[in-house]
Image (cartoon, rainbow, N blue to C red):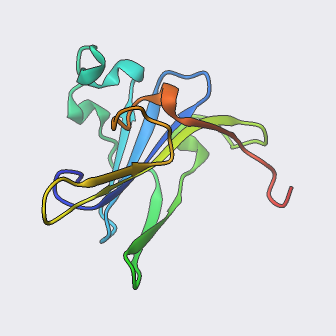
Amino acid sequence: MWELGDVFEAFIQLEGYRDYVEFHVTPNNKRMHLHLPGVGGKASDGAVPVPFEQMLVRPAGFASTAMRTRTGWRVTMSVPASVFRVPVFHPGLALRVSFCRYDAAATGEPVLSTTANHPVIAFYRPHEWTTVALKVPGG
């Protein structure tokens, strides 16, 4: 997806866990769900790479809607607690998150953007993601 065009990527890890998930959505709502075994799940981290087929989750365990807008496109996602092997999301649950865009550029290098403070463009580095805590709706 990221090699062929625009994609929105969400990286989420429960605080205290080594494994994490990636969700990818394209402007035409094509989806991909990956479950990575941990920080060393990618070959560029110096670890033994995990075969892609072992990371791919089928069917995708999240819902999404992609909508084109006058100026681009937007994504809405819904992720159930079961994706993280917990029965429910509860107030105070800490997550590490990074929401990223890979924007294809017809004239050359893609434009990469992220909510995390990465010193280099490498989205899959959980130690650089933002930690958030869940709140009670309306609280």
Is 72 situated above or below 14?
A: below
Horizontal arrangement in the rendering, residue 32 relative to residue 137 (left or right): left
Of residue 49 and residue 89, the one placed in the foreground of this image is: 49
Count of numbered labels shown in the rendering:
0
Q: Residue at x 50, y 47 (%)?
A: 115
Quarter occupied by the N terminus: bottom left
Dividing the picture into quadrants, the one containing residue 138 is bottom right
Question: Which residue ends up furthest to the top in the rendered image?
Answer: 47
Residue 47 can be seen, yes or no: yes
Q: Say above or below: 84 vs 7.
A: above
Eyeballing the image, is 125 above or below 47? below
Q: Name the residue rendered at 80%, 58% in the picture.
A: 137
Is any atom of residue 66 visible in this view? no
Q: Residue furthest left?
A: 107
Task: Give the image location of residue 43, x and y in percent.
Answer: 24, 22
Q: Position of residue 100 (x, y in %)?
A: 41, 50
Task: Identify the residue at horizontal 32%, vertical 69% (top origin).
Answer: 27
State the residue at coordinates (72%, 44%). Answer: 134
Image quarter of residue 49? top left
Q: Would you place residue 124 above or below residue 88 in this image? A: above
> x and y percent of residue 68 in the render?
38, 79
x, y percentage for residue 13?
53, 33
Q: Residue furthest right?
A: 139
Q: Is residue 97 left or right of residue 57?
A: right
Residue 15 or residue 115, whichever sits in front: 115
In which quadrant is the C terminus drawn?
Answer: bottom right
Quadrant of the image occupied by residue 29: bottom left
